[in-house]
């Protein structure tokens, strides 16, 4: 799941302090502010992304929920079926953060964005240190492929 929040750093800290999530990766802006924190509930993969909303006075919102599939081939097969059925897809590719392959689509009934992904890497090392990204690190490799819409659903 990805959450956009005007107080994303505080939100990510809450998930760590209250629910025991651990930081797997994070991305800081050039001014040192935290843009995104990528967390794990089980120390094995990224389960939650908390991203700083760039809209002033924005309400917290869910950008998308995610479901894991077994392989990139499953993403391509799903993409083909969705196209055949007229279901809108918002992008297919690979993330730099998490290194997971993805397909974004819209639920035809609600319009909610759903991500299908291949998961990410396992972090079973008890001495794991979060991967630190800084502004500019992803300029030439944020996506292979991409997402066509930043629109999200506010609840």
Image (cartoon, grey):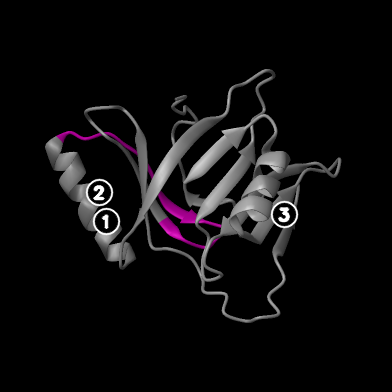
Q: CA distance from mark 1 to mark 2?
A: 5 Å
Tell me if residue 151 comes above or below residue 102 in the rendering: above
Q: Which mark is residue 99?
A: none
Please say if the residues under marks 1 and 3 sit with CB atoms less than 8 Å apart.
Answer: no
Q: How many marks?
A: 3
Q: Is residue 52 left or right of residue 88?
A: right
Quick one: SS at disc 3?
loop
Please say if the residues under marks 1 and 2 sit with CB atoms less than 8 Å apart.
Answer: yes
According to the image, label 3 marks what residue?
137
* Magenta span includes 82: no
**Mark closer to the chain start, 2 or 3:** 2
Q: Residue at x 60, y 44 (%)?
A: 50
Tell me where residue 37 appears, x and y as whole percent. Answer: 65, 50
Q: Residue at x 44, y 27 (%)?
A: 153
Most extreme residue toward the right is 31
Tell me where residue 102 appears, x and y as whole percent. Answer: 40, 53
Q: Which residues are magenta?
A: 86-101
| Crowd band around label 3 with a 10 angstrom C-alpha radius: few (<14), some (14–19), many (20+) | few
According to the image, label 1 marks what residue?
76
Q: Which residue is nearer to you in this view: 34 or 145? A: 34
Q: Which mark is residue 79?
A: 2
Q: Which residue is nearer to you in this view: 87 or 143? A: 87
Q: Is residue 124 left or right of residue 33?
A: left
Quadrant of the frame with the C terminus: top left
Is residue 97 visible in this depiction of the protein? Answer: no
Quick one: SS at disc 2?
helix
Quick one: SS at disc 1?
helix
**Mark closer to the chain start, 1 or 3:** 1
Q: Which residue is nearer to you in this view: 69 or 23? A: 23
Q: Residue at x 38, y 63 (%)?
A: 118
* Magenta span includes 95: yes
Tell me where residue 81 appears, x and y as whole percent. Answer: 16, 47
């Amino acid at each position: 799941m990805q959450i956009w929040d005007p107080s994303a750093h505080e939100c990510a800290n809450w998930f760590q302090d209250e629910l025991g999530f651990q930081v797997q990766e994070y991305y800081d802006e050039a001014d040192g502010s935290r843009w995104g924190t990528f967390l794990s509930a089980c120390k094995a993969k990224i389960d939650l992304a908390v991203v700083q909303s760039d809209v002033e006075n924005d309400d917290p919102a869910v950008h998308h929920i995610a479901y894991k599939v077994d392989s990139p081939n499953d993403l391509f097969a799903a993409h083909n079926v969705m196209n055949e059925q007229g279901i809108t897809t918002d992008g297919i590719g690979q993330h730099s953060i998490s290194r997971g392959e993805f397909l974004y689509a819209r639920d035809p009934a609600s319009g909610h964005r759903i991500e299908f992904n291949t998961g990410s890497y396992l972090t079973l090392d008890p001495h794991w240190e979060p991967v630190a990204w800084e502004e500019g690190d992803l300029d030439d490799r944020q996506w292979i492929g991409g997402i066509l819409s930043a629109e999200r659903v506010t609840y």
